[in-house]
Amino acid sequence: MPIDDSTSAKARAGAYLEIDLGAIQANYRALCQRLGASECAAVVKADAYGLGAARVAPALWEAGARRFFVALPDEALVLRDLLPQAKIYVLGGLFAGAEEDYLGKAIRPVLNSLGEIEAWRRLPADQRPPAALHFDSGNSRLGLPADEAERLIADPDLLAGVEINYLVSHLACADEPAHPQNKAQLQSFLAFSGSFPGLRRSLTNSSGIFLGADYHFDLARPGIALYGGNPTPGKENPMQACVRLRARILQTRDISAGTSVGYGATFTASKPTRVATVAMGYADGYSRHISNCGSAWLAGNQVSVIGRISMDLITLDVSGLPAEISMPGALVDMIGERETIDHVAERAGTIPYEVLTSLGRRYHRTYKEV
Ligand SMILES: *Cc1c(COP(=O)(O)O)cnc(C)c1O
């Protein structure tokens, strides 16, 4: 998305999204430190979790990331233009019909099945970049299922001529440290990888990094923690916030007790109330589930979302605040250090991943560099 930084573009916008590249870099470095000798990749699928791969990926490269994971070959091609030297992996695997793109752009498939291994082997060996191999240790989504894994162990020649530089698996419950599935998947991954001695291994996402060194192996694949989501839900967030979203107040009004606010009249004032209406809504990715239960910050004061979230408007209770701070044109912090992406997600009944990847296209976006 081209960014129009002109004053008039700013004046025309309803809300302002500031993405802190320095904070993303600091988060990358903090994870590297925690990982010690293990390498830290960067997961930048879905346009770097909605934050804009065009700016985020080069910032991560600058911070030292050399391996990048995306979901789709289409995303890999975009990333290749941004980072000519990066090692780029496609988690979705090898897409039939797109083989030439993998070869031509040195895109590394994370092979998910014996069928994909076979298709990869049919391509000219001298043109193939190294690939990764995904083993399903208990997530039942992608990767070699148990029967295919057994066949491969019994017949390693199925990989003849294929350079595999990582064995990969993915944890289902890493954000719940006490969940028995974590240890079960670890054991399963250890057992499978034991049949391929010498191959480097990668198991963890963001939360898995916090399960301890047993889970680190050679390469970690964090996404959400880079972007400020809490990888240790229920505990203090060790990561820095990377997103600040501010919305413009369009109008303020005083209503009397008994007056309702918004569609469906789902909120009725029980006392005289001052309502501020801001210029963003569910069309901008601020979930309608937050109706009547969200909060935001105006000049350091917490204010509540009242009434339904509309497509383009949100109504806030700004009662009791000095009139001059809630004037039209004032900016309300809808997401930021105080109203975190984890908090907004909880209000919306979802996870910070969805809050970030839903961030709308109408925001005036800026990137803060160190
Ligand atoms: C998305 C993804 C990650 C990153 O997960 P986070 O929880 O965002 O750190 C890592 N590995 C795989 C296979 C993924 O799909």
Image (cartoon, rainbow, N blue to C red):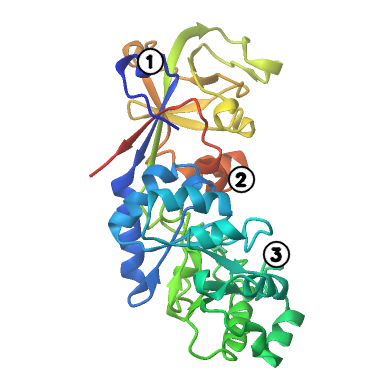
Indicate the amino acid at tag 1.
Answer: Ser
Indicate the amino acid at tag 3.
Answer: Arg
Q: For this view, does 360 lie left or right of residue 113? A: left
Residue 200 visible here = yes
Front in this rendered view, residue 150 or 312: 150
Residue 326 is tagged as 1
- Of tags 1 and 3, the one toward the viewer is 3
- The 10 Å Cα crowd at callout 1, few under 14, some 14 to 19, many 20 or more, is many
Q: For this view, does 241 lie left or right of residue 132? A: left
SS at mark 2 in the image: loop
Residue highlighted by disc 2: 350
* Label 3 vs 2, first from the N-terminus: 3
Indicate the position of residue 135 as horizontal and vertical percent values: 63, 76
Indicate the position of residue 155 as horizontal and vertical percent values: 69, 90
Residue 45 visible here = no
Residue 141 is tagged as 3
